[in-house]
Amino acid sequence: MNKTINSIQKKDQSLNFQSSSFWQKRIKEYLDPPDFLNPTVGLFLGGYAIAFLTIWQWYKGIWPLPVLVGLAFLALHMEGTVIHDACHKAAHPNKWVNQAMGHGSAILLGFSFPVFTRVHLQHHSHVNDPKHDPDHIVSTFGPVWLIAPRFFYHEYFFFQRKLWRKYELIQWGFERSFFITIVMAGIHFNFMNVIYNLWFGPALMVGVTLGIFFDYLPHRPFMARNKWKNSRVYPSRIMNILIMGQNYHLVHHLWPSIPWFEYKPAYEVTKPLLEEKGSPQRIGIFESKKDGLNFLYDILLGVRSHKKSRSKMRPLANLIPNKQWRKKWIYLLRKTAVIPDKN
C-alpha cells in the first residue's frame, strides 16, 4: 500500500517539472475547435427558446411573474456564455455560424458583439492594468452590488480607444438601432411592461452575475499581472454548472480558445503545472482577516485608488467639512489602494 502511495506521489512530483512541450501536448486536445453540434450551440438555441416561451407565457397569463422573470434570467445567463465563447471563436468551428451566434446572443442581451469582442480581448491583453484593462475599472470603481451599470464603460472604452475593425462600426450601428427600435416600439405599442419585466430587469440581474463571476471574483485582489497569477481557479462541481465553468477562469486566460465546457477537464490535466507556477486555486474570500475586510469593503463601497498618494480621488477630501473625516478619507484611500505588479 505504501509503495503504491509513494509511486503516485513520485508521479505527481515528476509532472511538476515537465517541459513546456510536454504540457502543450497534454493541453492540445482541448485547444481544437469544438464539434459542429456542441453544448454552446445548445445554450444559444436553448436561450432563445426559453426567451420565446417566457414571452408567450406572459401573454398567455398562466405562469406567475416570478417564474417568468426567473426564466428570462436563465435565458440571458445562458447567452452570456455564448457571446463570451463566440468572441474567442470557440462557440462553433464554422466562422460564420460563430459570428451569427455572437451577434444573436448580443441582441438578446442588449449588448453589441463588436464592442464586447474588442473590449474583452483588450482585457485579456492587459489583465489588472489600471490604464488599459477595461474590466479593471468595472471591478474596482464602486461597490460590487452596482457592478452591472459599470459595464456601460465598455462602450465608452471601445470608442475612446477606436478598437473597431473593418465593418464593426456598421455592426455596432445595426445592433444599437435594433435595440432602440424595440424600445420605441414598446413605447408606441404599449408593451414596455414586457420589456421592463422580461428584459431590462433580468438583464440587470445577469449583469450583476456576470460582473461578479466573470470580472470581480476571478481577478481579485487585482494585484497580479503575471499570466499564471492574474486570474484564479476555485474548483467546484456545483459552481461549474451554475456559472458554466467560470470558476476555472485562469484556464480560460491561459488558453482562451478552450470552450467553456472543457475548462474543468483542462484544469484537471494541468493542475500540477498550475501548482508549480503558484497559481491561485481558491476563491480567496475570508481566508484571512485582511482578505475578508477587503471583500466587505468592496461590497459596501469598493472605490479603489491606484496610488498611495496623489490619488485622483484625494481632492474629494476638500468637500468634507470635518477635518477628522478628511483624514479618515485619505487614510481609506491609502489603505484600500490597488497597485498591481508591473510584470
Image (cartoon, rainbow, N blue to C red):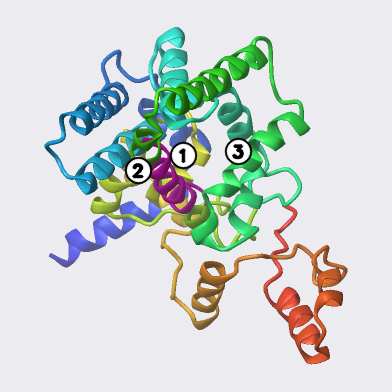
- 82 above or below 266? above
Residue 149, x across and y down, in percent: 56, 48
Label 3 vs label 1: CA separation? Answer: 10 Å
Do we see residue 218 in this rendering? Answer: yes
Lower sequence index among marks 2 and 3 = 3
Query: Does the magenta stretch mainly form a helix, a strand or a loop?
Result: helix
Lower sequence index among marks 3 and 1 = 3
Q: Residues within 10 Å of mark 1 (few under 14, many from 20)?
A: many
Query: Residue at (71%, 58%) from the top-left corner?
Result: 341
Q: Does the magenta stretch include residue 321?
A: no
Q: Residue 245 carries which label?
A: 2
User: Disc 3 marks which residue?
Assistant: 124
Do we see residue 279 in this rendering? Answer: no
Q: Residue 166 carries which label?
A: none
Q: How crowded is mark 3: few (under 14 residues within 10 Å), some or many (20 or more)?
A: some
Q: What element carries label 1?
A: helix
Screen quadrant of the N terminus = bottom left
- 282 above or below 21? below
Query: Residue at (51%, 20%) from the top-left corner?
Result: 181
* Kind of residue sitting beneath label 1: His
Query: Residue at (26%, 29%) from the top-left corner?
Result: 55
Residue 197, x across and y down, in percent: 35, 41
- 231 above or below 97? below
Q: Which mark is residue 252?
A: 1
* Kind of residue sitting beneath label 2: Gly
Magenta span of residues = 199-215
* Kind of residue sitting beneath label 3: His
Q: Is residue 202 magenta?
A: yes
Q: Nearer the viewer, residue 127 or 29?
A: 127
Q: Is mark 2 on a helix, strand or loop?
A: loop
Query: Residue at (71%, 49%) from the top-left corner?
Result: 129
Label 2 vs label 3: CA separation? Answer: 17 Å
